[in-house]
Structures are given as structure tokens and as C-alpha cells.
């Protein structure tokens, strides 16, 4: 059975999670990985929670369905952690928050590594925040930290 890495993104519609997930998928395909990615929306699309489920492997992927045990969970808003409790068991949490302390306030102690990145500050500075997140995820996958 091939080793399949699971990643899940949480955001609100319009946060750009699809842009980031698409860039991640394209980068991984160019590196020779097989990737399955699909979005999940709440019934109402505007300002509702959106998820993107991603699976990555060096071999063809035959697993379908939602990601339930992600290795990496990406939250585009720290407040969405309460809606993504199943992702708190991930080895790495990447959370849009100004500080790690704010993340701890929302979730308490978690088993995995928590990385807080301030996407809002990156956007204001004109930085390519999408590639910043993609690079964090790819480094975690390739270095075995996920």
C-alpha cells in the first residue's frame, strides 16, 4: 500500500484557500507526485466555511472521500479551529494568526507543531502569501516533518 500524505485546508469562501491548494497541487505534480484535491463547501457559499482536501503520494492514489486524519492542517482564520477539531491531531498546524499564543488561546495544547503565520500582514506587504504557505507545506512533506 502506498504512503499517502493527507492535508486539509480550512477557510471562509473568498479567503483564497483554493488558490493556495491549486498552487500546492501544481507544485507537487511538477515534482512527480500523484495528487488528489477537491473542495467541500457548506450549503451557502458566501462567507461560509470551505475546506479543501488534498492527498499526496509517490504512487497512484486509490483512497477517496474526505480527509479525516490529516498530517498537515492549514487554517486561514484562527477562529475556524473550533470548526475543524478533527484536524487538531495533525503533526503540523499552519494557522493564520499574529502569534502562537493566540492559537493556544483558541485550542489549548495540541500534539503537533503549531506554526502561526500572519497572512494578513503578508498581504498588506504585497508578498506572495500563497507561495509562502505552499513552500511551508512542501518543506514539511519533503523533509519528513509531516
Image (cartoon, rainbow, N blue to C red):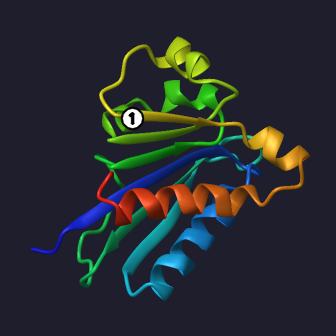
Residue 85 visible in image: yes
> In the picture shown, does residue 80 fall above or below 30?
above
Residue 53 visible in image: no
> Of residues 23 and 144, which is closer to you in this image?
144
Name the residue rendered at 82%, 56% in the picture: 127
For disc 1, the neighbor class at 10 Å (few under 14, some 14 to 19, many from 20) is some
Residue 112 location in percent, x, y?
A: 34, 34
Residue 144 location in percent, x, y?
A: 29, 58
Does residue 9 appear to the left or right of 145 in the view shown? right
> Of residues 119 and 19, which is closer to you in this image?
119
* Rendered-image quadrant of the N terminus: bottom left
Counting labels gives 1
Does residue 52 appear to the left or right of 90 in the view shown? right
> Of residues 43 and 90, which is closer to you in this image?
90
Q: Quadrant of residue 139?
A: bottom left
Q: Residue most toward the front?
A: 143
Residue 79 location in percent, x, y?
A: 62, 25
> In the picture shown, does residue 12 fall above or below 36?
above
> In the picture shown, does residue 41 fall above or below 20?
above
> In the picture shown, does residue 21 fall above or below 94?
below
Q: Which residue is mark 1?
A: 113
Name the residue rendered at 51%, 24% in the picture: 82
Name the residue rendered at 37%, 82% in the picture: 33
Residue 110 location in percent, x, y?
A: 35, 24
Secondary structure category for the residue under label 1: strand
Does residue 46 appear to the left or right of 126 in the view shown? left
Name the residue rendered at 63%, 44% in the picture: 11
Amino acid at each position: 500500500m502506498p504512503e499517502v500524505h493527507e492535508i486539509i485546508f480550512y477557510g471562509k469562501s473568498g479567503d483564497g484557500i483554493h488558490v493556495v491548494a491549486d498552487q500546492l497541487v501544481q507544485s507537487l505534480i511538477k515534482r512527480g507526485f500523484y495528487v488528489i484535491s477537491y473542495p467541500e463547501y457548506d450549503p451557502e457559499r458566501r462567507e461560509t466555511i470551505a475546506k479543501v482536501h488534498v492527498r499526496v503520494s509517490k504512487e497512484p492514489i486509490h483512497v477517496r472521500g474526505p480527509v479525516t486524519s490529516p498530517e498537515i492542517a492549514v487554517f486561514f482564520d484562527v477562529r475556524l479551529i473550533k470548526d475543524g477539531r478533527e484536524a487538531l491531531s495533525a503533526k503540523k498546524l499552519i494557522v493564520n494568526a499574529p502569534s502562537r499564543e493566540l492559537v493556544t488561546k483558541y485550542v489549548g495544547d495540541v500534539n503537533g507543531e503549531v506554526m502561526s503565520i500572519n497572512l494578513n500582514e503578508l498581504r498588506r506587504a504585497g508578498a506572495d502569501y500563497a507561495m509562502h504557505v505552499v513552500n511551508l507545506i512542501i518543506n514539511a512533506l519533503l523533509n519528513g516533518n509531516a
